[in-house]
């Protein structure tokens, strides 16, 4: 349930244990009570104080007067034939955002949004076409995970989190950082990925984090000219500087940077393009996720999906050059829920106001 904007009570969702403990100081009789509340909210995914049965009734009532445990409201969900679910969440100010959950090989990947829109304006992404939206707060980010976990009854040790939903996460680093710290209590940095269009100050911020998530770069073109046609942000953060920053990026042992490459017919899908991409990322521990475009004739009639043979030729050219390649064939396409596909990646969903 979302909450009334006028509700003055502090939401405990999206806060790490130490912060919950600090907030509760003075409202609980012993410090370990605050730790118990933190465990209920973070580890046990509680939705309210009434569930916290190891606290006295009086204490639950007292805490409930000052604090709340509130998640985004589910406005809608669409289930794909492959089990992917597209979630429409309502926030307390009437904005709606989307998330996607995708089961795969016994794991569940949750694709979370970080903003209610996007100012970056990639020319293949409906969220970008619809324009900027506000930053999501840590409770709104972590709340998407909490709701999906609860609704899907997913075992938490099988969950991966990717920030590839609506918005550019590295334009919301303050709230993203707080959300990551809370999410890490349950989902390790190794199972968390932040995907960016290439915001250089944000990548430096990530590099300096003591606990870094995995990094994915939305690359999408082999050269500066075509990249800035697709992604206007590339004018501000040119490809050459981006690649230099990535070569400096500290990688934990065994980790690689993922490059996402949306394949668009007759634009960036030739074998020569694959060879250029290979040269571009040579020397960086990397894997490439090739994503055949999820067409959207309504918003982007100029972009078409390549045929399967072209997709395969492109992927094989990368593989033959020694790169690790995966091709994401339209997961959740029937509900337009293909996280990582930029129509789908950002869901083509207008940040909506309800009411
Ligand atoms: S692809 Fe990502 S960064 Fe680009 S406009 Fe869409 S939401 Fe923003």
Image: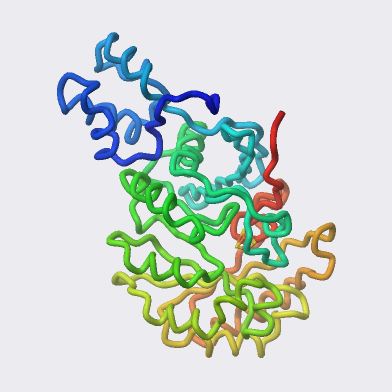
Residue at 60% in and 85% down: 317
Q: Give the residue at x 64% y 32%.
A: 75
Quarter of the rendering occupied by the N terminus: top right
- The answer to which of 216 and 150 lies nearer the viewer is 216
**Visual colour scheme:** rainbow
Q: Which of 124 and 275 is in front in this view?
A: 124
Which quarter of the figure has residue 93?
Answer: top right
Relative to residue 25, is residue 110 depicted above or below? Answer: below
- Total numbered badges shown on the rendered structure: 0
191 in relation to 19, above or below:
below
The picture places residue 163, in percent across and down from the top left corner, at 50, 55
Q: Name the residue furthest top.
A: 58
Q: In this view, does 350 lie to the left or right of 48?
A: right
Q: In which quadrant of the rendered view does residue 88 lie?
A: top right
Q: Quadrant of ligand 1?
A: bottom right
Residue at the image position 35 percent from the left and 31 percent from the top: 41
Regarding residue 163, the answer to whether it shows in the image is yes
The image position of residue 20, as x and y in percent, is 29, 34
Give left or right: position of 72 versus 95: left
Indicate whether 29 appears above or below 213.
above
For the question of whether residue 1 can be seen, the reply is: no
Task: Tell me the residue at 72%/57% (across/down).
Answer: 126
x and y, in percent, of residue 196 in the image: 52, 65
- Quadrant of image for the C terminus: top right
Q: From what the image shows, is residue 152 above or below residue 186?
A: above
Q: Quadrant of residue 339?
A: bottom right
Percent of width and height locating residue 150? 47, 32
The answer to whether residue 37 is left or right of residue 206 is: left
């Amino acid at each position: 349930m979302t909450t009334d904007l006028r509700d003055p009570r502090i939401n405990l969702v999206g806060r790490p244990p130490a912060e919950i403990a600090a907030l509760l100081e003075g409202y609980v009789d012993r410090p370990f009570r605050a730790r118990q509340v933190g465990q209920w909210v973070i580890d046990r995914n509680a939705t309210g104080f009434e569930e916290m049965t190891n606290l006295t009734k009086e204490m639950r009532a007292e805490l409930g007067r000052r604090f709340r445990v509130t998640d985004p409201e589910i406005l809608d969900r669409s289930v794909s034939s492959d089990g992917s679910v597209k979630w429409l969440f309502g926030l307390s100010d009437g904005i709606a955002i989307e998330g996607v959950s995708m089961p795969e090989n016994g794991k569940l990947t949750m694709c979370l949004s970080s903003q209610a829109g996007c100012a970056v304006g990639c020319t293949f992404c409906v969220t970008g076409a619809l324009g900027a939206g506000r930053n999501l707060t840590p409770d709104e980010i972590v709340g998407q995970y909490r709701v999906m976990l609860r609704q899907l009854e997913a075992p938490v040790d099988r969950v991966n989190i990717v920030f590839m939903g609506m918005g550019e996460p590295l334009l919301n680093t303050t709230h993203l950082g707080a959300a990551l710290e809370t999410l890490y209590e349950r989902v390790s940095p190794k199972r968390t990925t932040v995907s960016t269009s290439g915001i250089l100050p944000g990548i430096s911020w990530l590099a300096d984090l003591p606990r870094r998530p995995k990094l994915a770069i939305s690359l999408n073109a082999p050269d500066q000219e075509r990249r800035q046609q697709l992604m206007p942000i590339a004018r501000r953060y040119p490809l050459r500087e981006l690649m230099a920053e990535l070569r400096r990026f500290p990688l934990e042992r065994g980790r690689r940077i993922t490059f996402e490459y949306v394949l668009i017919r007759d634009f960036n899908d030739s074998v020569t393009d694959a060879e250029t991409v290979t040269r571009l990322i040579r020397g960086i521990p990397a894997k490439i996720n090739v994503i055949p475009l999820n067409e959207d004739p309504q918003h982007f009639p100029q972009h078409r999906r390549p045929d399967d043979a072209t997709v395969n030729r492109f992927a094989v050219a990368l593989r033959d050059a020694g790169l690790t390649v995966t091709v994401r064939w339209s997961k959740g396409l029937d509900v337009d829920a293909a996280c990582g596909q930029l129509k789908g990646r950002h869901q083509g969903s207008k940040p909506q106001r309800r009411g």
